[in-house]
Amino acid sequence: MTDAAALIAEMGLRARNAASLLARTPSTDKAAALRAAAATIRARSADILAANAQDMARGAANGLSPAMLDRLKLDPARLEGIAAGLESVAALPDPVGETIDEIERPNGLVLRRVRVPLGVVGIIYESRPNVTADAGALSLMSGNAAILRGGSEAIESSRAIHAALIEGLRAAGLPEDAIQLVPTTDRAAVGAMLKAAGLIDIIVPRGGKSLVARVQEEARVPVLAHLDGINHVYVDAAADPDKAVAIALNAKMRRTGVCGAMETLLIDRAYPDPAPILAGLAEARCELRGTAEIRTIEPRALPADEEDWDTEYLDGICSVALVDGVEDAMAHIARHGSHHTDSIVTEDSATAERFLAEVDSAIVMWNASTQFADGGEFGLGAEIGISTGRLHARGPVALEGLTTYKWQVRGTGQTRP
């Protein structure tokens, strides 16, 4: 057994023991741990920001892209958001033990489906230090133990935030093994986690396409993930012009490096005046890549090639095309989308309802920015990731998505004839 495999096996065994305890831990104790961790993050904010500054300096020296550096960066406001996120998760209803449904059979058997934790959740992520807090909090509150493997880009930030989580666990009298951070940045540890069937129950990757592709290709453990966030905003002929400009600008430029950012803008040829939408993006320093029609409307746009329609830029770049109505827009999304998040801007409710019903994405929106594709914005406290699959959980995955269920059957002596 390699050193990495031995390390993950040892961590997995400790996590399984912790998960057994967490499955029956009262909600009040789990919430108390998260509130104590939030208080520790605030008390140690200077130390955490200093650790993040080390990561930022190393990342810049190593040539991390602006989008990756933005994901990595912490400041007082973002750190307060992390602490507040822990408190938000602590305030959520505990799904463990919830009765999903109950029926009584004609023979008198009472069947009940009850939510239970998944067990041990492995989270593999890259440059977002906030994932350390979000994943740890959601795993704990849903009764799961977590094994966190952060990327080398954010190692100092992740260690500092993880230390605050451990303080929270100690304060609440819960096992420290409930939230473990893989101590090494050796990539072999990722491979060992992917093969840890029987120790880890589900893997959640958070990061770039190469990471997620590797996880999906190599994992011997179930995976909950999305590969790309190729998100669209479709401006219908009946769109309100002010909403169209505001939504397109926010969806692309609020934060270009998040998975909910718009990557392609589609505009109905019948929409009266596309120019203000395109000009607004260009003036916000968004590089537009468009068809010949688009370049006629907005001369600052560059030519788009076929790869642009299938690219998640995670940067201030947007591909743009004109389409012939909602049918053509939905066909484009079906060909090039990634089943993540797509939005329609229109005042025609019939067209909107058709878009909402027929676009096959985890999140479909009407008159709203795709940047709302976030667990916190959905009232989930935080998210461990966004799933674009069709099994188990879809969209932002939070407490409920980290549970499964079991059947409890109560009888009075029935035997089967």
Image (cartoon, rainbow, N blue to C red):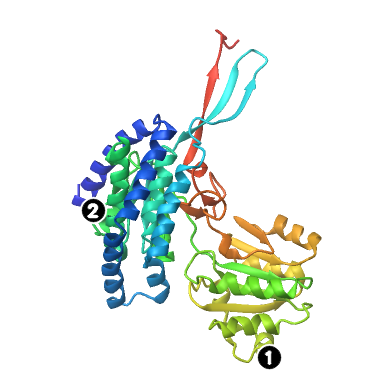
Residue occupying the point 49% across, 36% down: 94
Residue that lies at the very extreme toward the top in this rendered image: 413
Residue occupying the point 79% across, 71% down: 238
Q: Does 123 appear above or below 211?
A: above
Judged from the image, the secondary structure of the residue bearing numbered disc 1 is: helix
Looking at this view, is 73 or 293 the one in front? 73
Q: Does 339 appear above or below 137?
A: below
The quarter holding residue 339 reads bottom right
Mark sitting earlier along the chain (1/2):
2
Judged from the image, the secondary structure of the residue bearing numbered disc 2 is: loop
Whether pointer 1 and pointer 2 mark residues with C-beta atoms closer than 8 Å, the reply is no
The C terminus, quarter of image: top right
Residue that lies at the very extreme toward the front in this rendered image: 43
Q: Which residue is mark 1?
A: 296
Is 380 left or right of 236, judged from the image as shown?
left
Q: List x then y, in percent, for residue 348.
A: 80, 64
Residue 338: tell me if it is visible: no
Q: Does 67 appear above or below 20?
A: below
Q: List x then y, in percent, for residue 196.
A: 32, 45
Q: List x then y, in percent, for residue 185.
A: 25, 59
Q: List x then y, in percent, for residue 199.
A: 32, 40
Residue 282: tell me if it is visible: yes
Mark 1 vs mark 2, CA separation in Å: 54 Å
Looking at this view, is 149 or 140 the one in front? 140
The quarter holding residue 240 reads bottom right
Q: Amino acid at mark 1?
A: Thr
Q: Amino acid at mark 2?
A: Pro
Q: Which residue is mark 2?
A: 183
Give the class, few, some or many, for how many residues have Cα within 10 Å of label 1's Cα (few <14, many ≥20): few
Label placed on residue 215:
none
Looking at this view, is 68 or 90 the one in front? 90
